[in-house]
C-alpha cells in the first residue's frame, strides 16, 4: 500500500510540502491524506515551529511525522547556527543526549535474545565491581536488601542516581564526577563502584546513570566496545549512517549549534564550547550509553520505524516483536515514583516511558505510546495504536523559553483526520 | 537453508509415513510458514547444544509448535551419558509436576459430566478429608471452612508439600512420608487425613500434595483407579502412547537417565536406581502430583488439545469454556506462602497463568499458561501467539541456572510476524 502511495505521489507530483525526498532517512514518503493526516492541519505544526524561531526562543528545529510506514510531514525551520547564518538542514547533526538510552536498550536486548542474560540476573554476575554495594540511609551505609538486577538498570530502580539532586549520595556523585574525565566505560564503572546507592534496589524509581552501566554490560557480554557494537549491530543494519559517539571532522559543518537561554532572559545565546568536547575526542573509548550519541532526524526516524515495525526495517531484523512488547510494558507497577522525570499518566518500560493514561497525564496521545527525550530538547514518540512516529529535533539546553517538543506532539495529534 | 528445507521436507514425509502406520501426528512445517525465523530458531539450537557441551545437562529436547504445526524440534546430547545412549525424539522423561495439568484435565472431564462442582467440599467426596484441623500458634484449631475442589486445583487447600518448607506442619508431612511407600492412592489419603492443615482453607496459596488428592477424587468419582482412568479417558483418545505411571520393560531402553549436580558443582552425575524404582514397581499408588513418565511427542499432543480449546484431531476431551476456566487467575491477591510462586503470575486450575511479563521479568504473553517438573522439564501454551513450547531435561535441583527460562525467551525472540 505505502509503496503504491509513493509511486502515485510521484506521478501526480503531490510531494508538495516534502522538500528533499532523498533525505527522508531512506524511508517512504506519502501525502498526508494518504495516511490519514490533514495537510491543512499539518500547516499548523509548521506555523508553531516557525513562531518559536520568529520569537527568538529557538535558533531552529525539525519536526517529522510518519504514519503507516511513510513520512507524511518533514519540516526544518530556522537556523542550525544562527551566528554563522547556517540554515537548519534536513541532515543536521544533533546531540541527542538521553535519546541514546533507547538505542542502548535495544542493543542490550539483542544480547538478551541470544540468551546471554536474563532480566532478573544480578548485575554483579557480569560486572563484579557492582556487587555488594551499600545503601546510604541517613548518615550511614547499610547492606542492600537485594542486589540490583539488569531489569532494575532498565527501569531505573537500581538505586543508582544521576547526581542532580541534593542528597548526600547525589553530592558524592558530583564530587566523583562519575560521567566526566573517563577514558573508557570501565573507568566510569570503577568510580561508580566506590559510591553507595541512594535507594535499596527495586524500592524506588529514580532516573540515573544506569544506562551507562548498561553500556558496560553490552561491552562485557559482547566482548566489543560499545561504539563498535552499536555500529555493527544497530547503525549499519539500519542504515543510521550519521549516528555515533563522535562527530567526524569532515561533518563538522552539519553539527547544529547548541544554545542556552541568554543571561538577560529575553532570548538565546550559543552554549559554552566545553559542552561539546567529548564529540571530538576520537581517541577516547568513553562512550556514554546514557547520553553520548549524536544523530540526525533521518537516522533516528529509521530507528523509530524499526521499533514500530516490531523489530525490523527493510528486511533487517534487530529484535523480535515480543521483546519490543516486553520493553514497552509497565515495569514499575510496584515501585513508588517520586515526582520528576516521569509524570502522571506514564509508566516506565525498559529504557522507554510508556503513556498509560491520557486523562492523568493531561496530554493527547494514545495508551501504549512510548517515548523519551534528550537534554537539549529533542524528543520522539512511537504510537502503535495510530501507527505513528513523531520526532522533534532542536539544540537548546534547559531552562528553555519554549515548550517545543510538547507543543509539537499536541499539534501532530490534532492533524490526524481518519 | 536449502539443507534445512530438505530436512524439514523429508522429516515431514517420514512423519506422514509414521502417521499412517501408527497414530495421527502433529504436522511439521517450515518456520517461516508460521511466522517464525529459521535463523533465530538456530540460536536455540546453539544454546541447547552449549548446555550439553558445558556439562550442565546430559541432553535436552526443545519443541516449538505454532498454529497447530511443529516448527522446531531439536534433541541434543545424551539420554544416558554413561550408557552412551543418545537423546532421541521418543526419549521417555520423568515429568514430575507436569503430571498435574494432566490430572487437572482428567478431573475437569468429570466436572463436565456434572459429577461435582468447584465449590463442593472435598469431604463430601472423600469423607476422611472433612473436618481437618488447622495448626496455628502451636495448636490445632478448627478450620474456618472446609477445603473445596477449587482449593485443591488452585493450591489454596491449606495443605503443604513438606519438603519445601520448615514449619511444624511441613515437618509432620516429612515424618509421615505422605508421598512414599503407599500401596494405593487411598492409602496416601489415609495418611494425609491424620495431619493438620498448614493454613486455613482459602487463605493462602501454597504448593501442595493437593493434586494427589485430585487423583483420589478421580478414582472416587469414576470408580476406576487413576492409571486406568487416565489411560482410557486421556492418553488413548489423544494418542499419548508413551505416557503412564509405569515404564514398560519394553520401553526401558528409551527411559532417560536422571541426573543431579555433583558435590563439587562442576558437573552432573546419575542419581542412582532409587529415584527410578517407582516407575517399575507393582502397586496401585499413582501420584497425581508427579508420578507420570512421558515423551515430548505425547506432551505436545496434550498441549495442542488445550490450545485447540479442548480437542485434538476431532477427539474432544474438554469444552473450550472449561479450558478457559482453567487458565484464568483463580487466586487474585491472596498471599502466596511458597517461593514457587513468581511475581507476575497468577494461578488457574493446575496451571500457572502469566499475568504480567514486566513484573515477572520474563518475555511472553498475558494469558499464557504453563507448569514445570522437578527434573527441569517445562512447557507453556500461549493462546495469543497460538504457540506451544516444551523443554525436556532430566536434572534434579539444584541445577545450573536458566535452562528452561532461557529456552522460553529464545523461543519468543524467534517470532518474526
Image: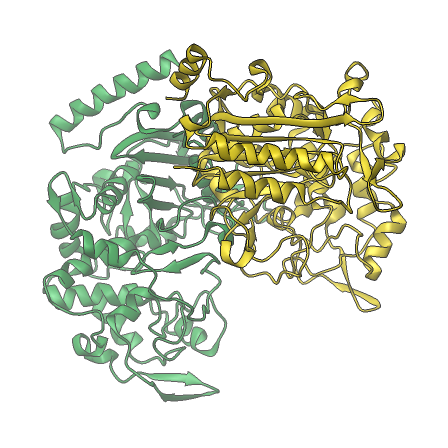
Q: How many marks?
A: 0
The residue depicted at 74 percent of the width and 48 percent of the height is A130
Q: Is residue A199 left or right of residue A368?
A: right
Q: Is residue B173 left or right of residue A166?
A: left
What x and y, as percent, mark residue A307? 51, 33
Residue A167 in sight from this viewpoint: yes
Chain letter for the part of the structure drawn in yellow? A
> Which image quarter is the N terminus of chain A in?
top left
A159 or A408, nearer to the observer: A408
Decide: is B17 above or below A179.
above
The residue depicted at 78 percent of the width and 21 percent of the height is A86
Decide: is B193 above or below B66.
below
Decide: is B211 above or below A219.
below
Quarter occupied by residue A417: top left
Chain letter for the part of the structure drawn in green? B
The residue depicted at 60 percent of the width and 17 percent of the height is A23
B349 or A210, nearer to the observer: A210
> Which image quarter is the C terminus of chain A in?
top left
A166 or A417, nearer to the observer: A417
What x and y, as percent, mark residue A49? 65, 35
What x and y, as percent, mark residue B103? 24, 57
Residue B51 in sight from this viewpoint: no
What x and y, as percent, mark residue B93? 33, 43
Q: In the rendered view, how is the structure colored? A: by chain
Quarter occupied by residue B205: bottom left
The residue depicted at 65 percent of the width and 60 percent of the height is A204
Amino acid at each position: 500500500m505505502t509503496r503504491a502511495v509513493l509511486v502515485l505521489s510521484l506521478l501526480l507530483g503531490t510531494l508538495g510540502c516534502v522538500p528533499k525526498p532523498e533525505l527522508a532517512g531512506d524511508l517512504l514518503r506519502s501525502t498526508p491524506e494518504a495516511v490519514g493526516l490533514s495537510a491543512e492541519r499539518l500547516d499548523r505544526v509548521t506555523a508553531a515551529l516557525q513562531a518559536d524561531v520568529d520569537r527568538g526562543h529557538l535558533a531552529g528545529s525539525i519536526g517529522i511525522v510518519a504514519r503507516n510506514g511513510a513520512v507524511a510531514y518533514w519540516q526544518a525551520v530556522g537556523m542550525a547556527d544562527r551566528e554563522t547564518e547556517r540554515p537548519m538542514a534536513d541532515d543536521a547533526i544533533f546531540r541527542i543526549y538521553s535519546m541514546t538510552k533507547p538505542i542502548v536498550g535495544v542493543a542490550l536486548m539483542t544480547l538478551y535474545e541470544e540468551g546471554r542474560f536474563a532480566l532478573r540476573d544480578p548485575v554483579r554476575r557480569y560486572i563484579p565491581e557492582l556487587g555488594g554495594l551499600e545503601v546510604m540511609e541517613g548518615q550511614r551505609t547499610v547492606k542492600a536488601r537485594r542486589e540490583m538486577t539488569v531489569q532494575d538498570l532498565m527501569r531505573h530502580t537500581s538505586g543508582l542516581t544521576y547526581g542532580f539532586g541534593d542528597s548526600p549520595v547525589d553530592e558524592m556523585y558530583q564530587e566523583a564526577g562519575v560521567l566526566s574525565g573517563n577514558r573508557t566505560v570501565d573507568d566510569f564503572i570503577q568510580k561508580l563502584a566506590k559510591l553507595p546507592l541512594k535507594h535499596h534496589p527495586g524500592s524506588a524509581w529514580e532516573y540515573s546513570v544506569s544506562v551507562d552501566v548498561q553500556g558496560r554490560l553490552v561491552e562485557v557480554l559482547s566482548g566489543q566496545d560499545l561504539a563498535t557494537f552499536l555500529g555493527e549491530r544497530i547503525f549499519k543494519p539500519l542504515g543510521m549512517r550519521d549516528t555515533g559517539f563522535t562527530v567526524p571532522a569532515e561533518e563538522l559543518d552539519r553539527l547544529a549549534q547548541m544554545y542556552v537561554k541568554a543571561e538577560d532572559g529575553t532570548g538565546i545565546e550559543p552554549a559554552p564550547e566545553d559542552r561539546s568536547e567529548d564529540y571530538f575526542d576520537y581517541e577516547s573509548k568513553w562512550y556514554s550509553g546514557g547520553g553520548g550519541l549524536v544523530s540526525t532526524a533521518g537516522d533516528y526516524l529509521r530507528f523509530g520505524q524499526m521499533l514500530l515495525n516490531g523489530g525490523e526495517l527493510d528486511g533487517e531484523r534487530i529484535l523480535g516483536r515480543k521483546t519490543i512488547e516486553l520493553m514497552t510494558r509497565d515495569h514499575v507497577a510496584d515501585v513508588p515514583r517520586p515526582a520528576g522525570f516521569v509524570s502522571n499518566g506514564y509508566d516506565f518500560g525498559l529504557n522507554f516511558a510508556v503513556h498509560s493514561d491520557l486523562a492523568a497525564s493531561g496530554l493527547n496521545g494514545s495508551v501504549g505510546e512510548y517515548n523519551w527525550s534528550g537534554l537539549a530538547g529533542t524528543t520522539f514518540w512511537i504510537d502503535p495504536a495510530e501507527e505513528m512516529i513523531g520526532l522533534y529535533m532542536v539544540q537548546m539546553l534547559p531552562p528553555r523559553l519554549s515548550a517545543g517538543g510538547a507543543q509539537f506532539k499536541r499539534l501532530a495529534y490534532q492533524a490526524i483526520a481518519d | 537453508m536449502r539443507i534445512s528445507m530438505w530436512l524439514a521436507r523429508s522429516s515431514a514425509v517420514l512423519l506422514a509415513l509414521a502417521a499412517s502406520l501408527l497414530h495421527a501426528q502433529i504436522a511439521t512445517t517450515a518456520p517461516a510458514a508460521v511466522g517464525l525465523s529459521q535463523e533465530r530458531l538456530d540460536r536455540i539450537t546453539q544454546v541447547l547444544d552449549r548446555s550439553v557441551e558445558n556439562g550442565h545437562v546430559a541432553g535436552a529436547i526443545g519443541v516449538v509448535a505454532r498454529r497447530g504445526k511443529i516448527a522446531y524440534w531439536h534433541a541434543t546430547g545424551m539420554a544416558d551419558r554413561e550408557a552412551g545412549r543418545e537423546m532421541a525424539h521418543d526419549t521417555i522423561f520423568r515429568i514430575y509436576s507436569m503430571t498435574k495439568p494432566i490430572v487437572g484435565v482428567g478431573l475437569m472431564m468429570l466436572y463436565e459430566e456434572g459429577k461435582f462442582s468447584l465449590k463442593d467440599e472435598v469431604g463430601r467426596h472423600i469423607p476422611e478429608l472433612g473436618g481437618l484441623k488447622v495448626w496455628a500458634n502451636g495448636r490445632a484449631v478448627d478450620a474456618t471452612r472446609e477445603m473445596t475442589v477449587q482449593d485443591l486445583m488452585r493450591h489454596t487447600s491449606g495443605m503443604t508439600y513438606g519438603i519445601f518448607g520448615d514449619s511444624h506442619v511441613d515437618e509432620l508431612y516429612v515424618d509421615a512420608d505422605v508421598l512414599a511407600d503407599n500401596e494405593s492412592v487411598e492409602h496416601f489419603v489415609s495418611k494425609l487425613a491424620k495431619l493438620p492443615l498448614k493454613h486455613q482453607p482459602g487463605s493462602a496459596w501454597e504448593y501442595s500434595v493437593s493434586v494427589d488428592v485430585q487423583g483420589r477424587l478421580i478414582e472416587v468419582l469414576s470408580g476406576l483407579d487413576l492409571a486406568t482412568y487416565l489411560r482410557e479417558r486421556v492418553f488413548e483418545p489423544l494418542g499419548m502412547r508413551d505416557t503412564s505411571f509405569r515404564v514398560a520393560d519394553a520401553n526401558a531402553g528409551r527411559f532417560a537417565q536422571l541426573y543431579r549436580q555433583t558435590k563439587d558443582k562442576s558437573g552432573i552425575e546419575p542419581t542412582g536406581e532409587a529415584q527410578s524404582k517407582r516407575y517399575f514397581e507393582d502397586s496401585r499408588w499413582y501420584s497425581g502430583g508427579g508420578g507420570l513418565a512421558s515423551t515430548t511427542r505425547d506432551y505436545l499432543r496434550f498441549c495442542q488439545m488445550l490450545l485447540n480449546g479442548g480437542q485434538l484431531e476431532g477427539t474432544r476431551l474438554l469444552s473450550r469454556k472449561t479450558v478457559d476456566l482453567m487458565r484464568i487467575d483463580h487466586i487474585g491477591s491472596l498471599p502466596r506462602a511458597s517461593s514457587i510462586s513468581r511475581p507476575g503470575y497468577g494461578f488457574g486450575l493446575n496451571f500457572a497463568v502469566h499475568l504480567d511479563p514486566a513484573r515477572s521479568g520474563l518475555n511472553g504473553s498475558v494469558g499464557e499458561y504453563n507448569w514445570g517438573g522437578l527434573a527441569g522439564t517445562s512447557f507453556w501454551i500461549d493462546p495469543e501467539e497460538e504457540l506451544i513450547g516444551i523443554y525436556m531435561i532430566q536434572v534434579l535441583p539444584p541445577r545450573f541456572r536458566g535452562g528452561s527460562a532461557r529456552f522460553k525467551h529464545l523461543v519468543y525472540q524467534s517470532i518474526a510476524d
